[in-house]
Image (spheres, rainbow, N blue to C red):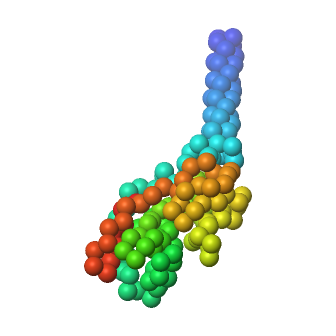
Amino acid sequence: MENELLDRRAFALRSAQVVLSGSLLTLVLESCAEAPTAASSEAEDPAAKTAVTTLTLDLNAKTNAALKKVGGAVKVTQNGAKLIVVRSSTSTYTAFSSTCTHSGCQVPVPNASGVIVCPCHGSRYDATGKVTKGPAKKDLPKAQVVLQGTNLKITA
Ligand code: FES
């Protein structure tokens, strides 16, 4: 009887050790799996995480006044989309993601020379979102723009 009681205690103790070590192993593996690295971020393409969004931009709004002249640009954050809209010509507009394809930093609108410089690691894009200098390797993802009267319908 005493041996049986001892065996039950040993069994309970061993079971508790197995459960605890399993939990610790799970915690360690989960923390390792969630740790992002700079090297892996290029492959993840942060811009690809953005869901398809449709938004309307009123060209008569004061906040969009920069789009009255060719070469002007504005940043738009609406419905979860982060975009840059550029007036490419008197009748055409271009829109693309403002999320750098290198590691996901937000890029500014094109400067006076039509160049977008990422503030994080210096990648450069032209005023159409095409990458011209790394470390980014992919262009800024384009959005579809349709001019409807004095509004732009943008699908990103
Ligand atoms: S996030 Fe690294 S260059 Fe833009």
Q: Position of residue 59 (x, y in %)?
A: 38, 81
Check the image and report above or below for 149 versus 12: below
**Residue found at x 32% / y 77%:** 151
Q: Residue furthest front?
A: 90
Place residue 44 in its image quadrant: top right
Report whether 156 appears left or right of 44.
Answer: left
How many marks on residues?
0
Check the image and report above or below for 95 versus 23: below
**Residue found at x 69% / y 19%:** 10
Quadrant position of the C terminus in the picture: bottom left
Quadrant position of the N terminus in the picture: top right
Q: Position of residue 146 (x, y in %)?
A: 32, 67
Residue 33 seen in the figure? yes
**Residue found at x 62% / y 72%:** 113
Place residue 120 in its image quadrant: bottom right
Report whether 63 appears left or right of 146.
Answer: right
Viewer-nearest residue: 55 or 139 = 139
Viewer-nearest residue: 49 or 114 = 114
Q: Position of residue 52 (x, y in %)?
A: 38, 57
Q: Residue furthest left?
A: 149
Q: Residue furthest bottom?
A: 62
Residue 35 seen in the figure? no
Report whether 68 appears left or right of 8.
Answer: left
Check the image and report above or below for 65 versus 6: below
**Residue found at x 53% / y 60%:** 129
Viewer-nearest residue: 1 or 46 = 46
Place residue 95 in its image quadrant: bottom left
Q: Position of residue 144 (x, y in %)?
A: 37, 61
